[in-house]
Each structure stands twice: as structure tokens, then as C-alpha cells.
Image (cartoon, rainbow, N blue to C red):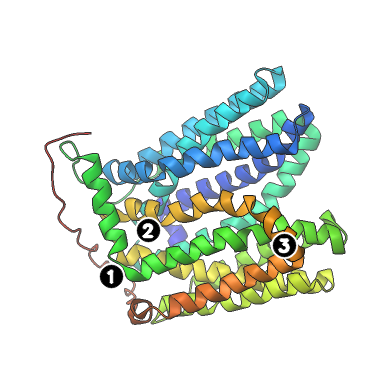
Amino acid sequence: MPACLRERSFALLLTGQASSIIGDSVSMIALPFAILAMGGSVGQVGAVLAARAIPNAILLLVGGVWADRLPRRLVMLASDIIRGLLMFIVAAALLLDVGGIWALIVLMALYGSAEAFFRPALSGIVPQTVSAENLQEAYGLLSTTPALGIAIGGAVGGISVAVLGPAGAIAVDGLTFVVSAICLSFMRTRGAPAPWRNRNFRTDLTAGWREFSSRSWLVVVVGGEVLYALFVMPSIYAIGPAISDEKLNGASSWAAVISGFGIGFLIGGLTAMKLRPVRPLVLSYLLCIPFAGFLVILAITPAVALIAVGAVVAGAVISISGTLLETTITREVPADMRSRVGSFRTLGSVAMMPVGMAMVGVTTGFLTTSGAIWLGAIAVLVNVVMVLATPSVRALRATYPKPGETPPEVAPKPEVVSETNV
């Protein structure tokens, strides 16, 4: 058993996250079918999904401030309870045929608002649940949870929609939030948030921005993630299925490719647990080059088997790269700033993802579907060059604690305290 799983709080966190990711996969299958079953259009499906994404992006920085002010476990617990309740209300509205599309838009906007507080809290809580020597191992295991979402969530979602209908499947998603909330309620975390009673909200937000922007290596990493949101993720989620429909066997072929990603995430996460590179960010971004290779294979569109094998490699290297990146950020950012820095880091990709999806029609119109995939591959390589050309990335070195050694947290920088309480 991995050593990090012997630490009870992390094991509970991992269980809750696996449950939530499976539930997300279920709802992403069930919700579009529910809207279409109501007589809705594809445009209305997009409107409901946008209703979740927009408040999430708007409130993400607010969530980061409060996740650093309050116990992160309680922030996550409140978010899970609210989102689970909202999923049960969505299921009831569909079952009783109440409210129509506008009800779903309002409910998903509330869901996205609650989600904006969960994600920054999650970015800061992992080192509070596991000892320092097991931190990278913990991130490696967490990086395998998307594989569960793809494999188990997809199967559960499909069966639930077929057997229970879309409303029943969304209720299943609500139950996964119950599981996650139970896990969080039994967790115990290290450390406590700094007192905030007489601190100004804007001061806290500004301090988070200073902490984020003072690290040139982190700023350039986020710039690359914006490129991914604009050009790479649409290549996978939107253009890939279109290529499969045009040139392969449609949904069955794309399911094989997605399954390859799931296998790769699992392999990569388990591999990353034991890696100890001296320059973790350099290795992290060199590993992105094979991912660009996968996009080239997808653009060329050979046999399905070759694309699926490429997806296994791509999933593995992205999982390893992500684990090294998350571990580095956690080690380099002060404990009391992690949620605020995490919210600034996430904001770019969250805000740009809808833009990237909206651009799909334009890019495929000018470049064809294969050309748009080539553009995604070029964006990956540009990102690699941009990050590795940054001196602070190459200068960053990792030190790894020995078993039983618990190094002190990175000392927080002093913050200006204001008498105004917001």
C-alpha cells in the first residue's frame, strides 16, 4: 500500500475526490440528455453548461481568499453539501417537469458559484492531510482519479441514464456529494488559518496576487495553461469526437481513445509517485512533448488502435507532468497563501475554456478539423519552449524530505492588516 494511504485524512480526501469525479462524469452525461428530452436544443445545452462556468470564473478569486481565511475542510464540506442539494433539486425539477430550461440555468449558476469555493480550498488542503515525505506520492494518486471518472463514471452515467432516466442519474450524482461530504466530515487537517477578523478583503486579495506574480516561473506556467484552454482542450473535447465521426467509426472509436487516456492517467499517476527529479519543472514540461505527438497522430488519423495507444502515452505523461507541477507549487508557496495563489492560477484556464470552445467553429472553418488539431499540437510545443526558456524554471530545484522528516512550512510573508473588515 502506498504510504500516503496509511494517513487517514488523505485516504478520506482521496475517497471523497474519487466519488465526486465519478459523479461529475455521470452528470455530464445525464444533463445534456435531460435537456434534449425536454425538447431543448444543443444551444440550450450550451447555455446550461455556460451558466455553471461563468459564476465559477467570476467567484474563483473570492473563493481563494475565503479558503485561506477559513478552515479549508469546512469550506469544501459546505460546497459539497450545497452542490449535492442542488443536484437533488435538479433531479426533482426534471422528474416533476417544473421550471424548464430557466430553472436549470439558475440551479447550475448556483452550482458553479459553490464550486468556485471548493477548488481553491482543494488546492491548499492536500499538504494538510499528508506528511511532507509522502506529498508527491499523494499528488500522484490524486492524478489517477480522472481515470476513475472516465472509466467508472462513464459506465455508471450510461447505465443510470438508461435504467433510471436523466433525473435518476443526476440524483446519483447528488449521492456522490453525500459520500464526499461524509469523508470530509471525518477528516482532520494540520495547521489553522491565520486570524482574519480585522483584515480587509482587498488587502488579502492583493497579497495573494503579489505572492503569485512574484514567481515568474508560476506566471509563465499559467500562461501556458491559458494556451491549453484556448487551443488544446477544445482539440480533445470538441474536435476529437468530430474527427472520429468523420474519419473513424464514430462514438465507439472515440470511446476507445478516451479509455486510452484513462489507462494512461492511471499508469502516469502510479509512476509519478516515485519520481524524484532535481529539476521537476524541466522534466514536467519535457514530458509534454509526447502529448504534442499524440495530437499529431490524431490530426493524421491513422487506425483507431494507433490513436488509442497514443492516448495511453499522452495520458501517462500529462499525469506525471501534472503531479510534478502540483507538488512543486505546494512546496514553493507559503501555506497560508496556497488557496489564493491557486485561485489566480486556475482563473486563466477557467475563464479561457469557454472562449476556446466558442472558437472551435471558427478554427475548424478556417483550418478544417485536422488543421485545428495541428494548431493544438503547435500550442503545446510553444508552451514547452516558453516555459523552458524562463530562467527561473530552470533554476528551480527540488529537495525531498527523508522518511520521518517533517520540514517546516514555508514561512508566510507578513501582510498589512487593515482596520476595515469586509
Give the residue displayed 49% in from the left and 70% down from the top. Answer: 273
Amino acid of disc 2: Val
Quarter of image, res 346: bottom left
Q: Against 148, is 181 above or below?
A: above
Give whichever of 236, 89 is nearer the camera: 236
Q: Nearer the viewer, mark 1 or mark 3?
A: 3
Q: In this view, does 37 lie to the left or right of 229?
A: right
275 in relation to 200, above or below = below
Q: Which image quadrant: the C terminus?
A: top left
Which residue is the extreme one toward the right? 249
Percent from the top left, x then y, of residue 356? 59, 55
Residue of label 1: 405
Q: Which residue is labeled 3 in the image? A: 366
Label 1, secondary structure: give it: loop
**Mark closer to the chain start, 1 or 3:** 3
Which one is earlier in the sequence, the residue at label 2 or at label 3?
2
**Label 2 belongs to which residue?**
130
Q: Left of 196 or right of it: where is 116?
A: right
Element at label 3: helix
Q: How many labels does the image show?
A: 3
Using the numbered discs, state the Cα–Cα distance from disc 2 to disc 3 in whole angstroms: 49 Å
**Residue 183 showing in the rendered view:** no
Q: How crowded is mark 3: few (under 14 residues within 10 Å), some or many (20 or more)?
A: few
Residue 127 position in % (x across, y down): 35, 58
- Give the mark nearest the N terminus, 1 or 2: 2
Q: Which mark is residue 289?
A: none
Confirm or deny contact between disc 1 and disc 2 (CB under 8 A).
no
